[in-house]
Amino acid sequence: MAIINKKSKEFLFKYLNNSSPTGFEAPGQQIWLDYIKPYIDEYHVDNYGTVYGVINPGASYKVVIEAHADEISWFVNYISESGFISVIRNGGSDHQIAPSKKINIHTPKGIVTGVFGWPAIHTRKGGKEEAPKLNNIFIDVGAASKQEVLDMGIEVGCIACYPDEIFEMNNRFFVGRALDNRMGGFCIAEVARLLKKNKKKLPFALYIVNAVQEEVGLRGAQMIANKIKPDVAIVTDVTHDTHTPMLKPNELGDIRAGKGPTVTFGPSVHNILQQLIIDTAKKNKIPLQREATSRVTGTDTDAFAYSNEGVPSALISLPLRYMHTTVETAHKEDVMNVIKLIYSTLLKIKKNHNFKYLK
């Protein structure tokens, strides 16, 4: 089964290189929707921008495959009289990586490019140095005053995004910003493409959902779960490769990039659906890793699981290095195996599949 073709890869790079911060996902959602249109029967967009395509929409039994579309960013929060800009998080942006990074501020007049400044090493005292914090990082756009910043179109509430683009490393990894979790959006789009290409007829309605606002509390998934009211949900997101320096596998779990996607064990994950995924991986010789979580997964799985009086839900995760940085790193084989696993699992779900624990 050919997984990623030339057209797929072009879509991946276009989609990942686009800025789609939490609350402002529309440009990326349009790219995603334009790509999946040939592979679906219909599509819908909810009030906050979650997009979903539907295959076999007339069926009463509803299965969701889902990823989230938003990326972390910054909000302009304050402009000093000297023309320097302070920011607050939009999602879980990492203040420690900000200094010396190039940044694009999106304004009604267009993009203004600036930098996160930081005092030169020559000016800092030896010994214990002040670390980057939310209250001391700042953006320099080359302005001499607050008024000049305002004249550029920059105001409080403008979004600031890193411009770093995706690239391939050692012909083995995809590297860039926003792989969390637009790589998941790519995977579910490829599942839709493969179903169409291979002329697979599903006995249920399949909803391919690209949700907004995950990075601020699973909000898009909460809304769309209540709208669709699915019978089953398979969510894909990212997890940590725990074998890079400074991480502790005995605390975080034993997960390695290149060893396959993971399944997560936790209260919100439905055991019967989970076992179906595990059995499917084994039958199709898809490498699979296991991890556990206390209480919640922290992904849209939780939103679907606890909606509508309970929806059998499971999580398939892509191992990722350096999450919430501009060099998020995912193994190509893992990406392809996420696609294979979701695709193959869908072919195992029957019409009105019974996921009840007791007979």
Image: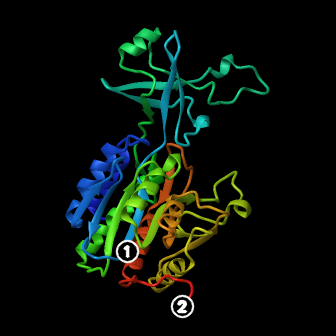
If you read the primary sequence from the N terminus, does the residue marked by circle 2 or circle 1 appear first? 1
Name the residue at 38% across, 72% down: 63
Q: In this orientation, does residue 169 appear?
A: no
Q: Nearer the viewer, residue 299 or 342?
A: 299
Q: CA distance from mark 2 to mark 1?
A: 28 Å
Q: Nearer the viewer, residue 35 or 211?
A: 211
Is 246 on the left-hand or right-hand side of 299?
right
Name the residue at 46% across, 30% down: 102
Name the residue at 51% across, 60% down: 303
Query: Residue extending furthest right?
Result: 127
**Residue bearing mark 1:** 343
Q: Nearer the viewer, residue 30 or 3?
A: 30
The amino acid at mark 2 is Lys
Location of residue 112 (image quadrant): top left
Is 59 on the left-hand or right-hand side of 84?
left
Q: Position of residue 101 (x, y in %)?
A: 51, 31
The amino acid at mark 1 is Tyr
**Residue bearing mark 2:** 359
